Amino acid sequence: MALAPFFSRAYSAIGAHLGITREELERVLSGHIVGIHLGPRCSVEGNEKWIAELLVNLLARLYPILSISGNETARETISASALAINPEIEIRCCLEQSTVVVHVGDTTFGNNGFLARVSGWVAQVGNFTGMPAGGPNNPYSAGAAAALAAWRVFQTIFVRPDSARAEFPDISLSLLDYGPSSGKTDPLPKMNVGEVAVAGIGAVGNPALWALSRHAGLAGELHLIDPEDIELSNLQRYSLTTYADVGMGKVQLAQRELLNTDFTLKLWPSSLEDFASNYSGIDKLPTICVSVDNVEGRRAAQALLPRLVVNGWTSDSGLGASWHRFLGNSACLGCFYHPKGTSLSQTELAAKALGIPHDKLVMLWVKEKPLEKGEIQTIEKYLELSKGKLRDWIGKRVQDVYSGVICGQVGIDLSGIGRVATVPLAHQSVLAGILMAAELVKHSAPSLEKKSQTTPLIIWDDVMRAPPKYWTTNRAKEVDCFCNDEIYKGVFADKWR
C-alpha cells in the first residue's frame, strides 16, 4: 500500500484521536479511495485552483489512494504536487469506486460527493446544488474551504462512515466576521501590513504564509523566525513541505513560498528570544504573528509590547486564533497563557513519559550520553511495548528518544498507551494557520477591521465534532497578568504615543 514515508507521524495523530492500532489504521486506509473532481477554473489562478491545490496537499499527507478527475491541466499539476509530498501515493482518474468525492467548482455531484467553494470572504462546504459560485478571489476563505473539506473527508471515513451525506452540516463561514455570509462580494484590498515578526514556521505558520503569498497586492516587511530544520515527521502536517525538503531550514522554506510576492523578507534562523536580543529595531516592532510550540515564546511575544499580536494554535482536539492589543478590556496574549501553578520542566516531562528516574534522566540529558540496551529495554517495558521494539534507538540520546516518542517517529500503537501526546491533524493545523493569517490582515487594515468581529478569540474546541455554531468569544484579563501592571502599561503608552 502507498503509505507515506512519514506515516508513523500520521498514525500518532489519528491513532490517539480514535483509539485504534496502527494495523487497524492501515486497514481502514487501504479500503478507501478519496476522489477529487476539478472544475473548469481549477487551472486558473484564483479561488478554485487554491482550494484544489491545498485540498490535495492535505489529502496526500494521509490517504494512500487518490482519484483525481476533471480539468486535465489542473489534474496533471495537482497530481505532481501530491507525488512530491508522498512519492508512493497512487493516483487514479476514475471516481466510481471513491468512498467520498470533493467537487471543486462543479455543482454536479452524486450521493457520495459534496462541494467546496468560495465567494469573497465566505467559504462553503456541503451540498449546495444549483447555487452559483463566484465572487472575488480570497486565499483566506479558499484555504478555509480546503481545510473544512478535508475535515469532512476525514469524518466520512473515520468518524461517521455509515452516515448519509444529509447528516453532515452544510458549512458557510465568513472569515471576515465568522457569520455565514459577510463579505461574499468584497474584494481584497491592496495593502501593506507593515513590519511583522512571524515567529514559528511550523504546522500553523506554513498555511498562514501560504495564504499571505496569494493575496494580490499585499506588501510588508516580514521577519521570518524559526531555528529548526525540516524533519521527515514534519511532513504529516507542514503544508509547504515536500519529501525533497527534509533537511531544509524552516526559514528557507518560508522564503521560497514568499519569493515572488511584494514582501521584503529578513531571515532569522533563531528563537524569538534570540531575535529580540539581536534585532536593533525591536523596540519599535509594531506587530508579531506567533505560532511557536511553547508557552514561554507566546508570553515573550506579548511582553515585547508590540501594537498588535496575532496568535494561532492547535491543541490535542481543538484549534484557534486570536488577536490582541495590550491596552483595553480584553485579555492580552499573556493572559491566554498565564501560569496557573507550577508546571513540570522538560526533563520532568521526559522522565514521566519514558519511565526513567528524574535524577538519572537529567544526567543522561545534560551529558548527552548514548542510551544503552538496558535503558532502552526499561523504556520499552514502561510503555508496554514488545521487547526489541525500540532497538533502533540504542546509542541515541535520551532527548532524541523522548522527541521520537512524542512526535510519533517510533510508530508505536497509541490505543492502549495514555502517556504519549496527541499530534494535531493536518487539516486542524492548516485551518488554525489560515485563521491566523486572516486576523493579521484584517487588523492591519482599518477598512477591514471595522467590518470584522470585535471579539478577539476564534475557537473550534473539538475537531472531532461539527464546526461550532458560534466561532468567536471574548476573554477577560487575568488579574495578576503583566497587562494589568501600571509600569508595563506606562512603558507601552510611552512606546506608542
Image (cartoon, helix red, strand yellow):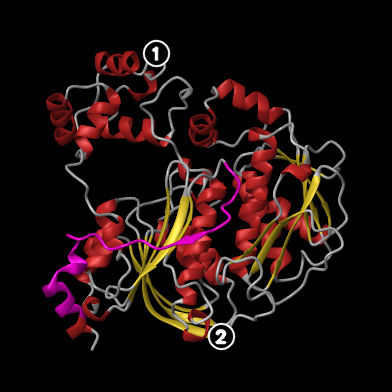
Residue 376 occupies quadrant: top left
Q: Residue 388 bears which disc, if any?
A: 1
Q: Residue 332: image x %, image y %? A: 29, 66
Q: Residue at x 48, y 31 (%)?
A: 16
Q: Mark 2 or 1 closer to N-term?
A: 2
Tell me if residue 227 comes above or below residue 496 in the rendering: above
Q: Residue at x 52, y 26 (%)?
A: 19
Q: Amino acid at mark 1?
A: Gly
Label 1, secondary structure: give it.
Answer: loop
Q: Residue 59: image x %, image y %? A: 65, 45
Q: Residues within 10 Å of mark 1 (few under 14, many from 20)?
A: few
State the separation of the CA atoms marked 2 and 1: 58 Å
Q: Residue 150 bears which disc, if any?
A: none
Asked whether residue 59 is in view, the answer is yes
Q: Residues within 10 Å of mark 2 (few under 14, many from 20)?
A: few
Residue 105 occupies quadrant: bottom right
Q: Is residue 6 left or right of residue 365?
A: right
Q: Amino acid at mark 2?
A: Lys
Label 2, secondary structure: give it.
Answer: loop
Query: Pointer 2 and pointer 1: residues touching (CB < 8 Å)?
Result: no
Residue nearest the viewer, comparing 280 with 141: 141
| Segment colored magenta | 465-492
Q: Residue 190 bears which disc, if any?
A: 2
Q: Residue 338: image x %, image y %? A: 24, 54
Q: Residue at x 61, y 61 (%)?
A: 143
* Tag nearer the camera, 2 or 1: 2
